[in-house]
Amino acid sequence: MATISVNQKTGVVTIQCDDDFLLKYLAGVTKSISFASVESGKKAGVVREPKAKRAKRRKRGAVKSAKTPKAVGKAVGKVVGRGMTAAVLDAVKKSKNGISVTDIVKKSGAASNQKVYNILSKAKKDGKIASTEKGIYKPA
């Protein structure tokens, strides 16, 4: 004899039965879950609490910092008062025989090579600059 009970408050299902019945019951439940998931278009898996009930997790040691005001004036090695694109294109235009990416980074004060590469590829596509060889750029 098998008895199945469900606690409405906690959602816990209690089954008291022999092994054969349990295996047949679980096989049927598994099929119904996979069938329901196929009908709804969702992946079968663990049911989670709605997002509103889940607590937001913060990284350990993470502290919200107050926004700091931007520095006024000219910073050493950084471009202030004009965009990074203008600084990169100025560095290319001032070069006569061409300029390498590392030199552009030094002259423009860019934070990384990748930003310079992105600016250069857009300018090259627009026809503002041309590349003489790999990594060397000159005005168009």
Image: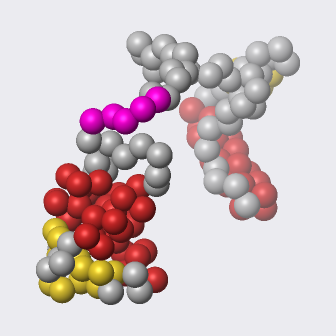
Magenta span includes 47: no
Q: Position of residue 38 (x, y in %)?
A: 72, 61
Q: Position of residue 96 (x, y in %)?
A: 18, 78
Q: How many marks?
A: 0
Residue 23 falls in image quadrant: top right
Furthest residue toward right: 8
* Residue 127 vertical placement versus 63 (above, below): below
Q: Is residue 64 left or right of residue 131?
A: right
Q: Position of residue 120 (x, y in %)?
A: 34, 71
Residue 17 falls in image quadrant: top right
| Residue displayed at 46% across by 52% down | 82
* Residue 19 vertical placement versus 59 (above, below): below
| Residue displayed at 16% across by 59% down | 102
> Residue 3 versus residue 43: which sits nearer the camera?
43
> Residue 115 versus residue 43: which sits nearer the camera?
115
Residue 135 falls in image quadrant: bottom left
| Residue displayed at 29% across by 54% down | 108
Q: Main secondary structure of the magenta part?
A: loop
Q: Position of residue 52 (x, y in %)?
A: 76, 27
Looking at the rendered image, the quarter that the C terminus falls into is bottom left
Q: Is residue 11 left or right of residue 67?
A: right
Looking at the rendered image, the quarter that the N terminus falls into is top right
Asked whether the viewer can see residue 105, the reply is yes
Q: Is residue 41 left or right of residue 115?
A: right
| Residue displayed at 73% across by 61% down | 41
| Span highlighted in magenta in the image | 72-76
Asked whether the viewer can see residue 1, the reply is no
> Residue 77 versus residue 125: which sits nearer the camera?
77
Q: How is the image coloured?
A: secondary structure
* Residue 67 vertical placement versus 109 (above, below): above
